Amino acid sequence: MDEVPWGRLGYWSGGSAAVPGLLRELAAVPPGSSEESPVWRLRDGLFQGMSTPGEVYDAAPYLVPYLLEVVKIARQPHRGLVVDLMTDIALAQPHRDVSWDPAAGPEPDHAALARAAMTADVDTIARWLNDASPKIVAGTARLLALLPEAATRSLPALRARAEKGVRPAGDAGAVTCVLAVAWLAAADHAEWFARLRHATTAHRDLRAMAVVGLALASPAAEPDSDAAVALLADAQADPASTFGHLRWHGDGVMPAGSALRRVEHWQRAVARDLLARPGLQRIDQALHGAREAIEHWRAAPTELLPMVADRVRDLVSAPSSVRRRRKLGQQDPLVSAVELIAHSGRAAAGHADLLAELLTGDPAEPWPDVAGPAVEGLARLGDGRCVPWLVAAFLDEYGHVKHLDVRDILPAMAAHSDALIPALRTYLGSPRYDSRDCLNALVSWGPAAAPLAPAVAAHVSPAYLSVALPLFGAIGPGAIDVEPQVRALLDEGDRAEAAWALWRITGEPGQAPALLTEHLARYGGHAAHDTAPMLEQLGPAAAAAVPVLREHLHDPEHGHLYDRVAIARALWAITGDGEGLVTPLLDAITARPLPGWGWRRPAPELLAVQALGMMGPVASAAVPALEAIAHGRARVTERAVRADERYQRAAQRALSIVDKQPPSSTRPGK
């Protein structure tokens, strides 16, 4: 252990001695200890960022054998956390070293190497299924589910442990083992799941998880009976269910939710069952089930939102004391239901009247809790009934604006710019708030934001005026009043973007092509994310940038780290030559999930879809990928309905252009 160069393999304070010290400390923790576990400090230096699973550093495969040894220590109080850590490693992506030299060969995939180390010792891991601790059993089952290469060795142990749970008492470990079998090889175990489902002596939760296995065995099939749907819904809704006590690293709050995301008809059927149940006792579970279905399946909002709206009406008519008897940290279900409608994309338009009815009282006074999501929902639809409330928020009444996602709601409200601009002037001039999100959102208004330009220039200090350049450029000639302030930035650090904004305002390219090209050459491909879109807008006038753009696009060493979508779009706009551009655009849109948002502009992946449409028949090779985005049943984003709808619309428009005529390597006229 002391011979491993830990200091070069992760980021722990204390250098190479940190990991051996933490492992020894972990192994020595006495039974019953209530001190903070060393596992948390161990994982701090192992992963990039705070997200789970995230990216894992090079230490992972070296660490696995020692973690296996720790779990073997009888009565070690943190063994469950160690199993969870191994699961996070198995789920993780490898951290990519930006300084890796391609001449040294392919960069090792340390996440895959860690999984291989676990697979090699899967017999040891499988023995943990016989542990006395339900948490260890459940965590082990999930870990084994992430090692499909070892399935032939782990499945017998998982089945054997699951069958121990065929008894009246609830057995969280057995339930999790059933799900692990379904995760690894559902189709091969349909008969086994059927026997468990109909085992009259088995606990309800075990039979319900067997239903999940049957659903995964035939993912395209409709539910075979209402009784099966009700059984699964009962287990989901019951707070005493073992479902609620399992940690399953997946997409749902409860394990079954993670699995149901693979079977559309079952997930929607369970959501319908839960929403149709009368009373408010299980409303939280019903809303959560509906949210999971709506966020994953494109057909779900049309089917489920009317039922959610009915529950909103029930909640409005219920005594507030009923809704307020909540556990600490639980949100009012009325607020949750309205948030769900507001985040459900275009289908929310059918319930705009309901959202408007919830806006009661004086918007200049403190808002009821439900007002915020109702305002956001109407604003996303561009519905003017939310204007008085937005005006009050931007006038800084009671700090309501802090609870609104300004970047998300302003773009659709451009048609109401005249009514909002006076209040926006006040908001942008307030020192209390960081207005950058607002400035970025107003870019989508284009010329409609022109009346705000002088106010922005007056209230933003000269040192930070550059943050408003994208807005001034989007406004164009309407921002002529701020031309002197923008021109003054030509002598500052943001010369390239200032030159671009001047071109947008005056119509004269001036120094913009040369300064942008110089900036890209000086700061390298990492600058392409911000610089290439401005070169794209300049089009043929930026011809001098073509050699630099091509150099970065084809950089064999670091090109994968650059925004190749922005570079490809700029090259197409400048040259009209599509040779070599379709592949980087196509590479950007094949991974799942696609991101919902970008920084200061739409996500590169959405811009890639749009670019393929702009290229027309040249991009014919992208038709299958575009069809998957345009016509797939599942969403291409993660918990981002409106973002998925943007991808879908962009792909549909792109297909209408790409499919029109035989492909050519250049656009018409070139």
Image: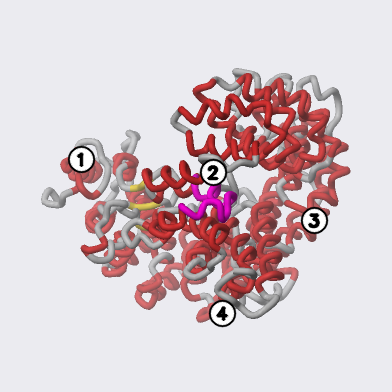
- Mark closer to the chain start, 4 or 2: 4
**Rendered position, 399 above or below 596:** above
- Viewer-side label of 3, 1: 1
Quadrant of the image occupied by residue 229:
bottom right
Could you give the CA–CA distance between mark 4 and mark 2, rounded to whole angstroms? 46 Å
**Rendered position, 502 above or below 621:** above
Q: Which residues are magenta?
A: 531-544
Q: Mainly helix, strand or loop, the magenta region?
A: helix
Nearest the viewer among 211 and 499 is 499
Nearest the viewer among 351 and 499 is 499
Could you give the CA–CA distance between mark 3 and mark 4, rounded to whole angstroms? 29 Å
Nearest the viewer among 612 and 104 is 612
Residue kind at label 3, given as amino acid type: Ala
Q: Which residue is mark 3?
A: 276
- Mark closer to the chain start, 3 or 4: 4
Quadrant of the image occupied by residue 217:
bottom right
Q: Is residue 156 magenta?
A: no
Residue kind at label 2, given as amino acid type: Trp
Q: Name the residue located 78 percent from the left edge and 29 percent from the top edge.
A: 420
Residue 190: image tag = 4
Q: Is residue 536 magenta?
A: yes
Q: Which residue is mark 2?
A: 599
Residue kind at label 4, given as amino acid type: Ala
How many residues crowd around disc 2 within 10 Å: few (fewer than 14), some, or many (20 or more)? few
